Amino acid sequence: MTYQSRVYLSFGSMAALLLIVGFFQSWSVAFAILNLCLISSVMVLGVNMQWGYAGLFNAGVMGFAAMGGVAAVLVSAPPVQEAWQAGGAGIVLSFAIAIATAVAVGVVHWKMKSGDLAKFAVITAIIVIGFVLYRMNLDPAVEAIEAVEPAKTGFLGGLGLPILFSWAVGGLLAAGVAWIIGKIALGLRSDYFAIATLGISEIIVAILKNEDWLTRGVKNVNGLPRPVPYEIDVQQSPFYQGIADQLGVSIVEFSSIYVKLCYSALFLVVLLVIFYLSEKALKAPWGRMMRAIRDNEVSANAMGKHVTGRHLQVFILGSAVIGIAGAMLTTIDGQFTPASYQPLRFTFLVWVMVIVGGSGNNLGSVIGGFVIWFFWIEAEPIGLWMMDLITSGMAPENALRLHLIESASHMRLIMMGAILLLVLRFSAKGILPEQDRQSHR
Amino acid sequence: MDLLNALVALANYILVPGIAYGSQLALGALGVTVVYGILRFSNFAHGETMSAGAMFAILFMWLFQSLGITIAPLPTIVLGLIPAILCMIVYLLITDRFVYRYYREQKAKPVIFLVASTGLMFLTNGIIRFIIGPDEQRVSDGARFVMKAREFKQLTGLNEGLAIKTSQLITVLAAVAIVVALFWFLEKTKSGKSMRAYSDNENLALLSGINPDRVVMIAWTLTAILATVAGALYGLDKGYKPFTYLQLLLPVFASAIVGGLGSPIGAIVGGFVIAFSEVTITYAFKKVIKYLAPDAWAPEGLVQLLSTDYKFAVSFVILVVVLIVMPTGIFKGKSL
């Protein structure tokens, strides 16, 4: 099968699957799946830059997606004036102290002779004093902020800007984290990099769950503003009522589909822009250099390419894309729920998408995002149905049957793990294999 | 000023839990180090391997309990360890046969092994949840305490009690026994020497007629023993919850890297470094300061450097510092 026909066949089948859901389940469900497929594809494009272009194993996709979610809160949530008055100054001061401490440590690190015991002592002293001052200012401020109407707010709130801005801010925040981690762990062994990304993502999520003054923690931030109209407004507008009548659908169903379509359009624009830029970059000399580094670091280094520098670059870019996707996800949810950041859902699933779609191929990433998300959503019904089938011979109250049906939801983990291992082993190139330049001619 | 009470409080809340947790981390890190030394990749599935070992131990514990076989005052799970280890050896050899062997023959890059082990991690986690369910299982039976806080107070007449749980004592004894046996095996037996030779220089070892398949098999066997004991002890000490082992991955790897990946001594030292840092930094020192300082100085807050929710941040920070300052770890493992 030629590459072209593979592309048409895979995208055609995916469209057919969504149409089947539309006709047999409901169009509302079909568009809901489509929207999350689009977001997943953006996220996969980000991971594909890191893994497909450069061969970097980022085990902390979850953390970068969570940075996007934080951006949505910080940009769009309405600011809480009382909380700012209660503890805003303390927070700002304590962060100024933290930054000053970091700068002081940096200055000492550069200015003093390395390997000196005095240097170690000075740095330790600066960190200890800085930490004590930081906590002395932070703790009362946090307490004051969290006391402001804890059931409703109890956090600083955001800037109250339109949530669309947060997509860019999410990318920037994720890029910032990636810069720090990349500076530390890139250039060392690939395992160290993987561990470092795994660690930072766990820490980011722990911070989001516990720092109530920033994100309300596990109390969640609900009711984030939307970039698209609310269903209720659509339903009350005579203009849309007219269209719904002409189409012959109820206004309730129409409004639900209309809102989802608006999201789809926004997500599609982002996906197309990022896809276009990724393809451009991959086809450009920069992309060829990245692949040369990936395939043979030693010779690329000998050719004068700065391997660690390029790795840092592509890691930051990929993480920024993941952050954008994370902000988009929080936007469509309309709420920020730190407890929903699970490694299975955010790190591992995206990895399965990249590998199944085809590492190094951007179209492959898009189709991987679509296919795996579709089956992720449909896995539970399929798993339940299979368990029901397997155990149909048993009595309804048979203990084994009950246990199996109860455990059907864990089938997702087993299924995704098995898919990853099987594809990696038997079809390592994925659905749409990477194309080198020759084959395009 | 009450030095004795302060010391007892420190021992009760930092020393005893730190030693027990450090032993568990050391055993876990030893497993990572064995796989790293022989198969040359970081086994991300190791946390779930520990969890699976603990699960088998619990299943056998239930079997023994239902048959009425107990070894009171010791917890029954100790009895379940031996069949659990056998099950884990079989499981790891199967995964090696169907997952890793192919990549070994292909001489794949280490990062491919890493991705494969991540896949295995989630597959194993799914199987565990499928068999035993996602809920917490209580595993301690038999005598809960070797020394109760109240008994210690009566014995010494101090205000502070020193409690030692049976699980903590068993953890330390088992860890010592296993580490001694492991070092004896690596240093004194022919198989152990061939493993060290293979780890040091693969080509030279192959030239001297060492059978690589046998070395790999022994490595997985050792990993099964280490991981099962570490996982079951952790479950015995803190309660068995399938999802905690994913979070244990970070401290275990931090221990192995801090000590120096590939160095068995390093893994043990690293385990204790990480465990004591974690316990010390997340301990609220209010009580100790109250004993040491005059009443007027008594602190208002808990004097806790970091809340326990951030305990893995401690291992992460130590890991980062080690990566920046000395990437080969304390004991100069293989790196870069």
Image: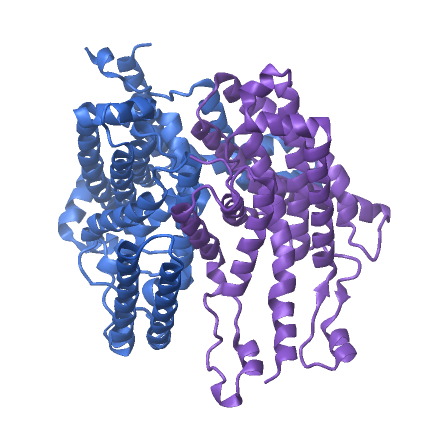
Q: Is residue B189 above or below residue A68?
A: above
Q: Is residue A359 above or below residue A400?
A: above
Q: Residue furthest right?
A: B68
Residue B53 relative to residue B262: left or right: right
- Which picture quadrant has residue B87? top right
How many numbered marks have been drawn onto this rendered protein structure?
Answer: 0
**Residue at x 36% of width, y 75% of height:** A136
Q: Is residue B150 visible?
A: yes
Q: Quadrant of the N terminus of chain A?
A: top left
Q: Nearer the viewer, residue B149 or A415?
A: B149
- Residue B300 placement (x, y as % from top left): 46, 82
Q: Quadrant of the C terminus of chain A?
A: top left
- Residue B107 placement (x, y as % from top left): 48, 19
Q: How is this picture coloured?
A: by chain
- Residue B80 placement (x, y as % from top left): 76, 44
**Residue at x 74% of width, y 54% of height:** B170
Q: Is residue A406 visible?
A: no
Q: Colour of chain B?
A: purple
Q: Is residue A114 above or below residue B300?
A: above
- Residue B121 placement (x, y as % from top left): 53, 37
Q: Nearer the viewer, residue A268 or A234?
A: A268
Residue B215 relative to residue B304: left or right: right
Q: Residue furthest bottom?
A: B296
- Which picture quadrant has residue A113? bottom left
**Residue at x 79% of width, y 50% of height:** B76
Q: Colour of chain A?
A: blue
